[in-house]
Image (cartoon, grey):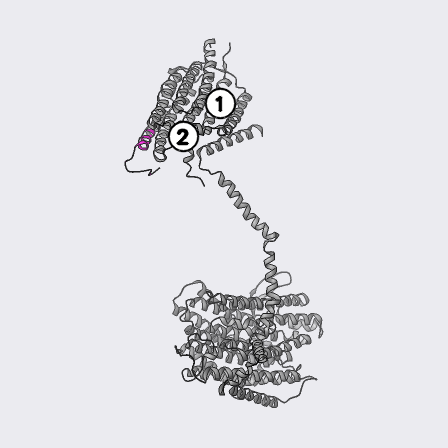
């Protein structure tokens, strides 16, 4: 059997990304929003790895490593902010964080 | 590429998609995280099938093993009770997911269209082992490594500062 | 020496600019303002000496500064023209302005807008001098508008009281009606004769138009319209009494001596035109005669000191218009000169009285001031006698009797005009001595709180002196003006009265007025009370008091319909267009404000939608 087409790998990444986006837009709880962001990052990473594998070069994987590092950093800071938010408003409702409305 | 790996790819892909879909629709945070872990493990298998064993390991170790655990810590710290579950169910009502699903579906359709139209040739599956990744990482991509370490340092400092429970200061400097 | 001519309007203009733009301490402001007018006055005297000593060719001197614009054949210049007529007027006006500025330094000393006042006054003098010296009607119109503007600014000088603003507005709008007529007249003149240069006009007009030509009559009547507005004659005289809301020096300068004589100057300047249009000239005389009567009756009933003087001004300018209309051109200018002296003095002395009594304007609340304010009393008396025409001593008598004689014996004179002029003398004498007796004689009704200082008294004394001796230059005056303004010799149809005879009758009428005033106002007030007690008397009093009902008439006839139309038209199509733009903006704002909800997921959705659209555009377009 021939190899898996590159398109499938990319499409998998796209589906994961879309699912993450849907979760981001759907959920009102800030925690779930953060989880959805992680899903999106993961999906983008899948696409990178697939592309790197097609050319047989490590660059795709390295890209994913950097995405991983960025995701880790973002998660830690994001969760710290989440804790702050919860301490101030005693809820995780994203709609409460709307003081920048016009 | 062996049949085994190919079928592993497809199966793992399907599992990943289903578990991700489940993860974003749970009302209890811990349930969602568990489904997320399943999804990440499946993605790890996908990576292995795509010939990236290092990444498969790292996905499990770091993503599922550190980041999701971080989420779990925070969930446990927040200790949201039963009323949180109530409000979650309320928030996840019917009309709140119609719009997002449509938007995501359209975006997905466009992306798939792009990919299919481009008709990329070639297939994934070439094994790129840890050795090559390591050589590339500490070769041409050395500066990226250093920057990533600085980023992580910044994240550590920021998180420790933000997460500190300040005595007497209520909401100052948000 | 003649080449210094351009400095006469330029110096006040420069000082006005300096006072308007820069800030100076009060003393410096006073110095700058007064010295600029003094400089103008001095230069005008130097120019006079030069003119008399070595008259230029044709007894006229033109100084061209630069060409204003050049459009096809139309090339008006900024140029000044000096002939006996403009020379006399410039000298008189510069000198009187100087005296009034000197007076104002003390009169306005307690006021906040000191610098602003003098800036406006200097600008006014500059505009008036430009008007007088202009060699073409366009530059004259510039000066015309300039004095109108300054009049508005100065009438409404104490702008914090809305009444003053209204008075200023009324003055501006009423004179605007006249200005528009004048502008149309200028268009007509240019269209038919191809130039606005005054001397060229005076040459071309007899060539193009025969006597009585329709275009000439039309132009004459239109220019008369402008003159009527500026000089407060019938039917546009309603603004002058209300203009007394301004400070007294303003009334003295603008509304007695200078601006209101601009109309007289205009008609005198374009006298060739009026000679070509007898109906227009007759209209001038009729306007003058009617005005002097109406204003005279109105002056009899006023209780505000300044308003009496305002109506008196209207009446005296009516005399000047009468003189112009019957062809006695030099008499009009002579009366302008003497009137400038005694009317400015009357206003200045009235200002002394008003300030001394702490802003009391009502003559029935004054009285017995001749011991307390001696200088004011004597100068006011001298000016009043000059106004009424005390024979032989006062200047006013000479000029007014000249006009009265001319009303009978000049080219268009007639018995009717002569009688009207005599009635005018009676009225003038009556209201003048009414004023004097009520203010300075009898018992005191108000206390004197402030005595005037030197800066206010010296101009009064100087003007009083001129009001006496000014008349003695009558004969050399007439000779001097001969080249510019000939006296139309008596033609058939005029009444032949000897000058002495006319003057005697005038003197007798003056005495009659004086005696009547004494009986009615000094002896006992019971006669006047009985006159106004019955219904007819009271109605007549009210009628004369309200300027023969003209304010009421104009309000009903013109103001209200116009306001009504404006109110109805408020939301019309064009207005809707502009407010529609504003409403559209507000609507767009509201819509866009909705997108700034501050909600995170909303913004994320925006990003997603945007990327979808962008990709779609790239893909499919």
Say which chain tag 2 marks: A
Quadrant of the rendered structure where residue A27 is? top left
Residue C477 in sight from this viewpoint: yes
Q: Position of residue C544 (x, y in %)?
A: 57, 77
Q: Does the magenta portion include B168?
A: yes
Q: Position of residue B123 (x, y in %)?
A: 49, 15
Q: Which mark is residue C346?
A: none
Q: Which mark is residue A14?
A: 1
Quadrant of the rendered structure where residue C553 is? bottom right
Say which chain tag 1 marks: A
Quadrant of the rendered structure where residue B16 is? top left
Mark found first going from the N terminus, 2 or 1: 1
C441 versus C609 height, above or below: below
Q: Position of residue C98 (x, y in %)?
A: 46, 75
- Residue that sits furthest to the left in the current view: B167
- Mark 2 lies on a secondary structure that is helix
> C49 and B27: which one is in front?
B27
Eye-nearest disc, 2 or 1: 2
Q: What is the span of residues highlighted in magenta in the rendered image? A: B154-174
* Distance between the alpha carbons at the discs numbered 2 and 1: 23 Å
Q: Position of residue C24 (x, y in %)?
A: 40, 65
User: Label 1: how many residues lie within 10 Å, few (<14), some (14-19) or many (20+)?
Assistant: many
User: Label 2: how many residues lie within 10 Å, few (<14), some (14-19) or many (20+)?
Assistant: many
Mark 2 and 1 residues: CB-CB less than 8 Å, in contact?
Answer: no
Q: Quadrant of the C terminus of chain C?
A: top right
> C544 and B132: which one is in front?
C544
- To which residue does mark 2 refer? A30
> C165 and C392: which one is in front?
C165
Q: Does the magenta portion include C299?
A: no
């Amino acid at each position: 059997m021939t190899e898996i087409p590159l398109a499938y790998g990319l499409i998998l990444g796209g589906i994961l990304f879309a699912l993450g986006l849907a979760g981001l837009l759907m959920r009102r709880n800030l925690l779930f929003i953060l989880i959805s962001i992680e899903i999106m990052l993961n999906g983008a990473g899948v696409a990178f790895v697939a592309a790197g594998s097609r050319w047989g070069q490590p660059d795709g994987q390295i890209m994913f490593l950097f995405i991983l590092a960025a995701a880790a950093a973002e998660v830690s800071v994001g969760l710290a902010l989440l804790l702050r938010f919860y301490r101030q408003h005693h809820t995780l409702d994203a709609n409460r964080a709307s003081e920048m409305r016009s | 590429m062996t049949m085994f790996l190919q079928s592993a790819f497809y199966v793992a892909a399907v599992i990943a998609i289903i578990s991700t879909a489940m993860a974003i629709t749970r009302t209890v945070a811990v349930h969602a995280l568990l489904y997320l872990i399943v999804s990440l493990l499946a993605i790890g298998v996908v990576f292995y099938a795509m010939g990236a064993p290092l990444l498969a390991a790292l996905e499990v170790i770091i993503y599922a093993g550190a980041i999701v655990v971080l989420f779990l810590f925070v969930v446990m710290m927040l200790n949201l009770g039963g009323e949180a579950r109530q409000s979650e169910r309320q928030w996840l009502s019917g009309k709140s997911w119609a719009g997002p699903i449509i938007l995501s579906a359209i975006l997905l359709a466009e992306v798939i269209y792009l990919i299919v139209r481009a008709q990329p040739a070639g297939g994934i599956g070439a094994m790129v082992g840890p050795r090559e990744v390591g050589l590339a990482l500490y070769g041409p991509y050395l500066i990226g490594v250093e920057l990533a370490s600085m980023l992580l340092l910044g994240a550590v400092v920021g998180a420790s500062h933000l997460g500190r429970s300040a005595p007497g200061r209520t909401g100052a400097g948000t | 020496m003649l080449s210094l001519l351009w400095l006469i309007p330029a110096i006040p203009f420069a000082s006005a600019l300096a006072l308007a733009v820069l800030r100076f301490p009060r003393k410096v402001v006073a110095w700058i303002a007064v010295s600029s007018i003094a400089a103008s006055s001095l230069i005008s005297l130097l120019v006079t000496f030069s003119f008399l000593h070595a008259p230029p060719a044709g007894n006229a001197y033109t100084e061209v500064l630069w060409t204003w614009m050049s459009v096809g054949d139309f090339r008006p210049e900024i140029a000044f023209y000096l002939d006996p007529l403009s020379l006399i007027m410039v000298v008189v006006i510069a000198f009187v302005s100087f005296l009034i500025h000197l007076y104002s330094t003390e009169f306005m000393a307690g006021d906040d807008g000191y610098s602003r006042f003098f800036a406006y006054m200097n600008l006014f003098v500059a505009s008036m001098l430009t008007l007088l010296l202009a060699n073409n009607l366009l530059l004259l119109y510039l000066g015309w508008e300039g004095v109108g503007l300054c009049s508005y600014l100065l009438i409404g000088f104490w702008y914090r009281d809305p009444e003053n603003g209204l008075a200023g507005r009324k003055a501006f709008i009423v004179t605007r009606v006249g200005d528009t007529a004048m502008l149309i007249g200028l268009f007509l003149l240019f269209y038919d004769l191809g130039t606005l240069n005054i001397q060229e006009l005076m040459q071309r007009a007899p060539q193009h138009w025969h006597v009585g030509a329709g275009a000439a009559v039309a132009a004459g009547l239109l220019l008369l319209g402008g003159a009527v507005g500026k000089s407060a004659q019938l039917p546009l005289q309603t603004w002058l009494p209300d203009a007394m809301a301004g400070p007294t020096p303003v009334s003295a300068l603008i509304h007695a001596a200078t601006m209101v004589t601009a109309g007289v100057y205009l008609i005198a300047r374009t006298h060739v035109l009026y000679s070509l249009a007898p109906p227009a000239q007759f209209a001038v005389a009729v306007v003058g005669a009617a005005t002097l009567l109406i204003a005279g009756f109105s002056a009899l009933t006023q209780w505000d000191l300044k308003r009496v003087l305002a109506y008196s001004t209207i009446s005296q300018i009516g005399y000047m218009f009468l003189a112009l209309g019957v062809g006695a051109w030099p008499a009009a200018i002579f009366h302008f000169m003497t009137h400038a002296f005694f009317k400015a003095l009357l206003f200045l002395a009235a200002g002394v009285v008003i300030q001394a009594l702490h802003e009391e304007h009502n003559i029935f609340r004054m009285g017995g001031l001749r011991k307390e304010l001696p200088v004011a009393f004597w100068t006011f008396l001298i000016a009043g006698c000059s106004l009424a025409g005390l024979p032989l001593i006062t200047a006013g008598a000479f000029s007014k009797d000249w006009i009265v004689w001319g009303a009978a014996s000049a080219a268009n004179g007639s018995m009717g005009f002569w009688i009207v002029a005599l009635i005018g003398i009676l009225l003038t004498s009556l209201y003048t001595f009414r004023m004097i007796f009520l203010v300075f004689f009898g018992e005191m009704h108000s206390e004197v709180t402030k005595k005037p200082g030197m800066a206010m008294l010296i101009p009064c004394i100087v003007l009083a002196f001129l009001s006496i001796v000014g008349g003695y230059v009558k004969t050399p005056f007439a000779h001097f003006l001969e080249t510019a303004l000939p006296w139309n010799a008596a033609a058939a149809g005029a009444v032949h009265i000897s000058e002495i005879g006319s003057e005697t009758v005038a003197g007798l009428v003056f005495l009659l007025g004086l005696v009547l005033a004494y009986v009615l106002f000094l002896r006992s007030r019971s006669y006047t009370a009985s006159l106004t007690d019955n219904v007819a008397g009271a109605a007549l009093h009210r009628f004369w008091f309200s300027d023969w009902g003209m304010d009421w008439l104009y309000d009903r006839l013109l103001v209200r319909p116009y306001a009504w139309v404006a109110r109805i038209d408020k939301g019309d199509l064009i207005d809707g267009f502009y407010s529609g733009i504003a409403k559209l903006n507000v609507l767009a704002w509201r819509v866009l404000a909705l997108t700034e909800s501050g909600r995170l997921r909303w913004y994320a959705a925006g990003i997603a939608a945007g990327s979808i659209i962008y990709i779609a555009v790239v893909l499919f377009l």
